[in-house]
Amino acid sequence: MKISVITVVRNDVEHIEQTLLSVLGQDYADKELIVIDGGSTDGTVEVIERYANRLAYWVSEPDGGIYPAMNKGLRKATGDWVNFMNSGDQFATEQVLSDLFGEEGVLARHLAAHPEAKPWVIGGNTVNVYSDGREEVHHAEAAEVIPLRLPFSHQASFVRIQPETFCFGEQYRYAADYKLFYDLYFAYGASAFLITDHPIARYRQEDSLTMSPQNQRAIKREYLSIQSAHRTWHWWKEWLKWRLM
């Protein structure tokens, strides 16, 4: 089973190498790393070039933002499952891919116990890392919370590649990953999500786009837009709160 990992980056010379090494250092053999750089000018490209012979594909050119870049990488992926590990983030251990996709891994055990299962998504825990040294484990939630929120970070998830249907909606600046999981949930149900308590990713929390109040409001607007496809009492309550912000 082949795993594709896609890393998108722009002007992050300080952190890109640790991400590349985290992916390349996985002890799972059947993997590929694709790097999409958005035209960096700070030395990031020179770091990528040092690892070029170990990459399945890489490119450096201007793009329309994080989700167009992720879609660009997805079009080059040849694996069965894909993970998006952004620059500066890392796998939690060197054994993450083996723990999930190895012969005795989480997916194999799940399929042995549930032969009829056909999971689309595997989600796990994220270790949020702060600049002051603090670390907090964000445990993946059950898939049933998807109508309300994202139960795991996209760095801590793997999605089964289906080229004819799988891409990120580029009309969203912040919440295209949530839109993907939201649509999968309502198309295939909670059983399409395999949730594990394994730590998958280490995430630089303070580099998140979610930090400013302005971005928080924009994210909320996009979530409400996505959730409007299945309006519930919760949606109306959250919509009213957003309007009063």
Image (tube, rainbow, N blue to C red):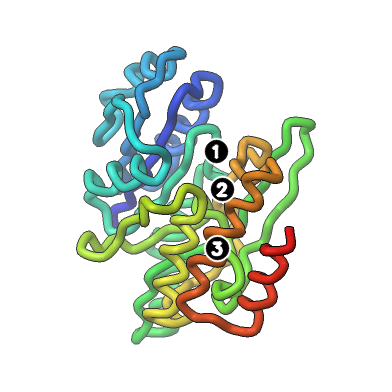
Amino acid type, mark 3: Tyr
Image quarter in which the C terminus is found: bottom right
Q: Quadrant of residue 8?
A: top left
**Marks 3/2: CA–CA distance:** 23 Å
**Horizontal side, residue 199 vs residue 157: left or right:** right
Q: Position of residue 9 (x, y in %)?
A: 43, 31
Q: Name the residue under label 2.
A: 201
Q: Distance between the residues labelled 2 and 1?
A: 7 Å
| Secondary structure state at the residue bearing disc 1 | loop
Tell me what residue is drawn at x 54 percent, y 33 percent: 88
Residue 11 visible (yes or no): yes
Tell me which label, 2 or 1, sits earlier in the chain. Answer: 1
Residue 23 or 129: which is nearer the viewer?
129
Query: Identity of the amino acid at label 1?
Result: Asp
Mark 3–mark 1 Cα distance, whole angstroms, equals 24 Å
The reply to whether callout 2 and callout 1 are in contact (CB within 8 Å) is: yes
Q: Name the residue under label 3.
A: 223
Q: Mark 1 points at which residue?
A: 89
